[in-house]
Image (cartoon, helix red, strand yellow):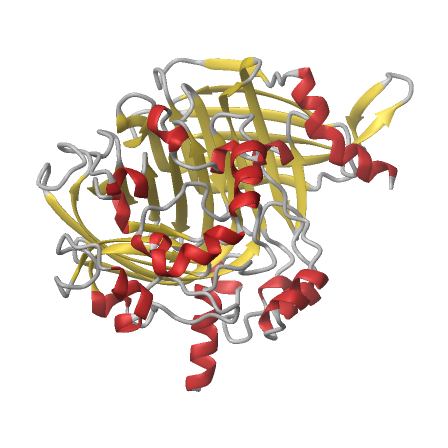
Amino acid sequence: STSTSTSTSTSILADIKAYAQQTPHSGRHFLPSHPFYHSKRKNEQKLKRKKIKSFLYNRLINPIRRPPYRIVNKRFMEGWYYRITLPQQQNQSFAFMFSIEDPQYEYQINKKKSSSSTSLSAVQVMGPNDEYIVQCTNDTQKFWAHENCQAYGCTFEYKNKNTGYNNGNDNNDYYANGNGNALLETSTSTTSPAIHPDEFYNQVQSGFQMLPTRLQGIVDGHDGSLGGVHPNQGVVCTCDFDIQIHPLSGWGDDPRNDDEDDYKNGQTQTQKRKRQKSTQKSTAGWLASYSVFEPHWQVTLADARATGHATWNGTRYEFENIPFYGEKNWGGSFPSKWYWVQCNSFHGYTPSSSISSSNDDYSNNNNRLSVTAGGGVRKTPFGEENLGMISIHYNGIFYENVPWTGEMEWETTWGKWNFIGRCTSGERLFEVEVEAECDPQSGLLLRVPKANKGLDYGCRDSFAGKVRLSLYELRYDQAKKEYVRSDKTPIIDNATSDSCAVEIGGGSYHDTWKAKSRMNKILKTFVRLPYLFKARV
């Protein structure tokens, strides 16, 4: 059993693709200043070998990953969001938000340059009854992240004050030598700054880490709705959590069962890469890999199941196989205006109690449903554009209504969200209607990275949204020369939930925003290319 445990831990700490549902952009986009990444002894030969490749790729092909010279004069943030929906009888949810802003880089540190006023490593947690905890540090060297999978973390304080660099020293030897099991040797002969999951609570006084299928944290912060974001600026609050995650749907059709078996049976990474034909997509299309849009958004897990616990100010919540959702953003700052609706806990659609944990056979639950709808004002080289999308995962099938495959219109204000979308190109033609509402007096103000203010209040959220969803097949009517609803029974007929997450960001929350998705024609043509090619194959 010891060897099995070591093998499992080795796998989840490796900087490789973690599971079949992993989406593009799961890995980091910022350049970490954590000592692990900048040990001269570890990186000297590696940097020489990659010098030419780094120049071509980082500076010319993908400027958003290029070295930190860009960041000196241009702001950058990267943030992750996860939500767990507790069983209906508790009627509660948790949202875990982690972010890094304007990270300080090695050349700045070596020259004793001060960090930006907006440099920040932060965790925010929205908990039961719309309560809110925040903990931050200006020391961005404490934040590490993998490049090829969703694994990252930040230790604010170690229990042993001489561990790491809480004592003010750049103690690279701790990370290089793996003291305290902080590092594990992986199958690819690389190491990770992640703390062994079994050692996390023995070593960490406060901090967090996300491994691809394990979320752990100890938050020793304060009430985020009072005071500022820095220590001692509010009423002391605490939260800790340890959550095992079982991925179900990424952002595309669910993988084939034999693809998932490859990961379970421990095939080598080379074999996995050859066998796995990922259907996972970028939420904003393939151009999201380049510095075209601002900001960027990626849903990383549209549906998953979570088992573990979360303790909120002394109250412990234990759960098994409850809905889990994940997404991330990166770029200069959040949009000037946006909306968002998310739900993967619909009445009558695989409630958590129906999923057996004894055999981990989640893929055979053929009544799973999740929806993510969102949009806002996006910056492009051609100016700003208003965009929206609705995408659904149902029975392992991905229904994608995006600006380059159809049309969408919305009407939102705090308390009501109404969307209608039509996908009129591609292999699945459909129409979707989503209506969500919440008490206009409810909701919590949360902070987001802003262009000039750093982490500041910028959106209003609630977990108590009531949502209705219907999905119809479309057919082309030759007489009318347009797509109309099919005479068949709706694919989804009025699915409902009382635990939908709703959000409005930027501007005035109570203003009505009614618009249609309008994407630049040039960008639309480029983003559509993979869909057109697939249709011709």
Residue drawn at the location 43% of the way across and 41% of the way down: 498
Residue drawn at the location 65% of the way across and 66% of the way down: 270
Residue 483 image-quadrant placement = top right
Give the x, y percent position of residue 10.
Answer: 45, 71
Residue 467 visible, this orientation: no
324 or 288, which lies in front?
288
Residue 80 visible, this orientation: yes
Give the x, y percent position of residue 214.
Answer: 40, 61
> How many circles with numbers are drawn on the protein?
0
143 or 514, which lies in front?
143
Lateral position of residue 460 relative to residue 516, left or right: left
Q: Is residue 344 placed above or below 292 in the rendered structure?
A: below
The N terminus sits in image quarter? bottom left
Give the x, y percent position of residue 128.
Answer: 27, 46
List the single residue furthest toward the bottom. 1
Residue drawn at the location 26% of the way across and 65% of the way down: 174
Q: Is residue 125 placed above or below 261 in the rendered structure?
A: above
Residue 442 image-quadrant placement = top left
Lateral position of residue 210 relative to residue 490, left or right: left
375 or 34, which lies in front?
34
List the single residue furthest toward the right. 479
Q: Is residue 194 placed above or below 4 in the rendered structure?
A: above
The C terminus sits in image quarter? top right
Residue drawn at the location 37% of the way across and 30% of the way down: 71
Residue 24 image-quadrant placement = top right
